[in-house]
Amino acid sequence: MEQEFGGLDVVVHAAGMMPLAPLVDLDLAVLDTSLRVNIRGTFVVNQQAARRIRPGGSIVNFSSSITRFCRPGYTAYGASKGAVEAMTLTLARELAGWDIIAFLTGPGRWVDGQVVYANGGAI
């Protein structure tokens, strides 16, 4: 595809995982997996995108409002999304000279099974 079209214009990275548990109960293996998926996954996608994206292009990463509205049970997720935010802001500065924009979007809450569980069944 890259050879056929001459490079990338936009990369959107939205993959992630959201384990929910209070810090005192959070299993270390779950934390490690969350950090690997959310931080390392973002790093790899961003690194490959930065190598291939054309001038005038954009890299979009997903964060979360949880980094500002910290809630019990979101320790691993909030920490990983905070790292994604720092990584994206740094990448934006690194790519500015190449006319490439890196930015974040941070969707808020929506009702699904994880949100209901995290809030003890109450929304």
Image: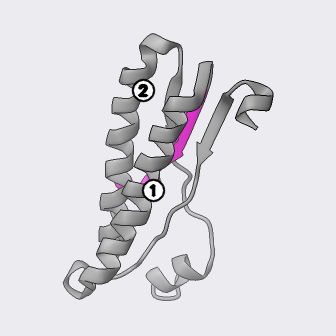
Q: Is residue 43 above or below residue 100?
A: below
Q: Examine the structure image and report whether residue 115 is included in the region drawn in magenta.
A: no
Where is mark 2, residue-wise? 92
Residue 123 visible in the current orientation:
no
| The N terminus lies in quadrant | top right
The amino acid sitting under disc 1 is Gly
Q: Residues within 10 Å of mark 2 (few under 14, many from 20)?
A: some
Kind of residue at badge 2: Ala
Left or right for 52, reference 7? left
Q: Give the image quarter of residue 111.
A: bottom right
Residue annotated with mark 1: 41
Q: Position of residue 7 (x, y in %)?
A: 68, 27
Residue 69: horizontal and vertical position, in percent?
37, 57
As drawn, 108 above or below 18: above
Q: Which residues are magenta?
A: 58-69
**Residue 54 at x, y percent in the picture:** 62, 21
